[in-house]
Amino acid sequence: MRFQKAFVLVLSYLLCSSILKCTGIKLENNGYRDIVIAINPNIQHNEQLIQNIQEIVTAASSYLHRATKERVYFADVKILLPITWPAGSHTVRRRTTESYEKADVIIAEPYHKYGDEPYTLQYGGCGEKGRYIHFTPNFILDSSLVSFYGPKDRVFVHEWAHLQWGVFDEYNELVPFYLFNGTSEVTRCSKEIRGRSAEHKNSSFSACETDPKSGLPKGDCKFHPDINQIVSSSIMFIQALSSVTEFCDDKTHNPDAPNMQNKMCNFRSTWDVIRESEDFRNNPSPYSGSVIPTFTLLQAKHRVVCLVLDVSGSMDSENRINRLRQAAEIFLLQIIEAKSQVGIVTFNSAATIQSHLKVIDNEGVRNQLVQLLPTTANGGTNICAGVQAGFQVLGDDDGATNGDEVVLLTDGEDSGISSCFSEVEQSGAVIHTIALGPDAAAELEQMSILTGGRQFAATDKVDANGLTNVFSSMVSGNGDISQQSIQKQTPNMFVYDPSGKMYNSNDFKIDSTTHTARLSIPGTAQTGHWNYGIRNSGIEQVITISVTSRAADEKTPLVTVHVHISEKDLKDHRTIYAQVSQGFSPVLFANVTVIIERPTGPPIEQQLCDNGLSADIVKNDGIYTKYFSKYSGYGRYNFKVRVQGKEGKTKTAIRTGGHSFYIPGYTENGIIQISPPKPSVNVDDLEADIGDFNRVKSGGSISVTEGTLNVDIPPCKITDLQATLAQNKVVLEWTAPGEDYDEGAASRYEMRMSDHLLQLRDNFTAAALVNLTNLNPRPFGSRETFTFVPENTELQNGTTLYFALCAYDKQEQSSEMSNVAKVYVFVPSPLVEHPKGSSVWKVIWIAIVVAILVCLIIGIVNYLVQKKCKGRTFAVV
């Protein structure tokens, strides 16, 4: 375990054993409202930062309005200030349900100091909203960065398109050039953007050399756009040009460019994707009013939390009351942050306030609250009574509930729960719901949805540690992870520190009421491997272990896990995302497993992958992904993610993904004006080893109701089809899909080819069929290879062929069409095939010399003849 200030090991022995919305943005009357821009609490107070944010967004609103053909603008923006910042001369309101954790734009320092490149974190595919935009404070404050990315309001709109509409970049730093009709083209949109490609060497520019094998520029060749253009698109390629004020549409789109927009959106233009988004389907008319946004300053505060706990008669079954006490004890003793305020309410047919708000400023207060946790259960269930008593407790500090939190746990049905929904929505408090067991009120999660809270569920299975995981996930959303407890391990009383010192049962604090044993390591725990052992004597029993710690150094961020479950799509699958990062740097090559507790049957485990296949969009971006479709029936499904990192294998990396194009320089009147170089990247930061670690994070729960389940699942889309030429044959390779998404093996393939790219997209079955009859699909994840000679097509210089395929299951359900692979036949000129000094070059040079001598002789003879003939003209040829 690394970076730990102190850790607590909790041993629980029993005989029986989040889903966050991507964004709260609303579009009303053409204006985007409830946009939250949050400043990280580690940033020092700076009034100029607030002013610059307002100026950038105001200018961006006008630019967005023009770019969207006067359809939308920024109407209402909230800036969330850290708790430590003084109000200054500003009017600052108390926040309600807004938080750093759920902000649309975050202002924060990167962990690795590799520059101020703005980017948007995107989990999903084309048309799916992103998670957040990240700007550094220096990007907001430093005016010189305009030379890197262009005006900042334009950068804001570029990133907004990633975030709100799920479009992608139209440039490609890895494939900056491609061949089209025998000519090297810049990867760009639109194709009408003009400029000069050159290589910068020894303080001067030279023409790019051409690779004789590929026909593409080689070396460090870069494209320098003309500073003056006559075209107006596209923002997703190069927003910095003054003429660029639009997105590429169907008239200007370049489908041949090998960029992420074409790959992810099936060669659709950016504007086509935006136009088909929910925003524009519901908002077609132009808007001609003011586009100046309104800004509201909000401020975070220390957490104010009330535990609202069900003690009705059903809580006495399945040992629920004891399990509740165990989990809530961990929350009070280890999870809730110092300086927070906590109260406790219990409810059955009526509600009882067990404790008004207490400030968590010492261990004694934590222990006092633990003693007030319930130990008995009886009576009926009145959830609204519990919530209303919770609101009363939350008002103890200032008479208001805005921005406060309720942790509501219940296992019972309650037909009257909807009677307080209006009060809940108007409270300004955030309600996190925990459904315990199979019979909790079906409408319970609506309270979380109305207030932007999290939804959790826990089962009664003897091997489940659900409640402990849920309460351990109830950390603050203020962005200061150095004050958060990170759950390190979950599973099976001896503890050895890295130096070999042993802690035994005598060092544990035993609580016979809750059946827990607790070991607290004072001060800063040693870095290294901690080992534990359990020796169970007597009757068989289930034992669970939970280890938590806090950061030892606030400047060194912990490895954290954020879990997101997508909304249901048309085929009823969900996508599970686990973002593993250290600061803002992605963590690669970790072992990530999701454990799903289902309404019936035992829990199941599935591996999440970061390999760019199936549900995973981008390889090695620290976002581990998996489709989920293994439903066992109607009811609640609870998700928990376990992450393990191994020393020597798991590493951090520089974040990639959607970001604004860095301009290496401009061309003006044929002369290139070079831009300042990008900050250099520390090679050690590219793959920094972070050692061993373990994390467990509750991902929340989903509910599957009757009549909404579809069990017919096709194979997943093939996303890595590649085509190459080898000795006049086409070699095709791809990763096999499954029978059901990425499970099992498909039944058959259908591959088509065409010399027209968009024919495959628009009329797949009309394209020429490639015979794959003898190719039997292999299991998901296997590599497939097929080699053939195209019939009725001569592979000659300039020939272009496109390939795509679909996979079918046994029910003849088809996957989506794969990505399109391209083969371009390039035959180098004979002259460039022979190096200087070869016999061919010698012959060429001799011929040139002879030609020059002949021309000289002819010229001399003509001169002499003309002189002798005194003015009569003759020519010797």
Image (tube, rainbow, N blue to C red):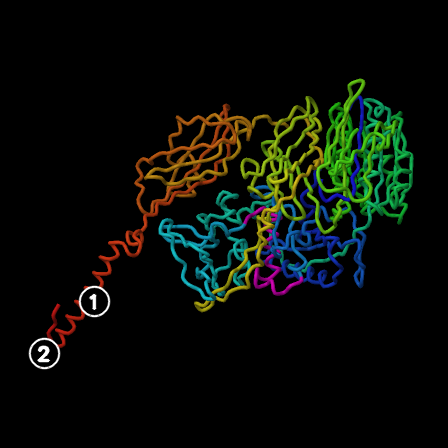
Question: Can you say whether 408 is above or below 143 in the image?
Answer: above
Check disc 1 and give the amino acid type: Ile
Q: Which residue is mark 1?
A: 852
On the rendered structure, is 751 left or right of 34? left
On the rendered structure, is 731 left or right of 137? left
Q: Residues within 10 Å of mark 2 (few under 14, many from 20)?
A: few
The kind of secondary structure element at disc 1 is helix
Q: Is residue 129 visible?
A: no
Q: Position of residue 345 (x, y in %)?
A: 88, 36
Question: Can you say whether 653 is above or below 439 in the image?
Answer: below
Q: Which residue is mark 2?
A: 872
CA distance for labels 2 and 1: 27 Å
C-beta proximity under 8 Å, tags 2 and 1: no
Quadrant containing the N terminus in the rendered view: top right
Check disc 2 and give the amino acid type: Arg
At x 85% / y 23%, what residue is drawn? 316
Which residues are drawn in magenta? Answer: 141-168
Residue at the extreme left: 869
Closer to the eye: label 2 or 1 = 1
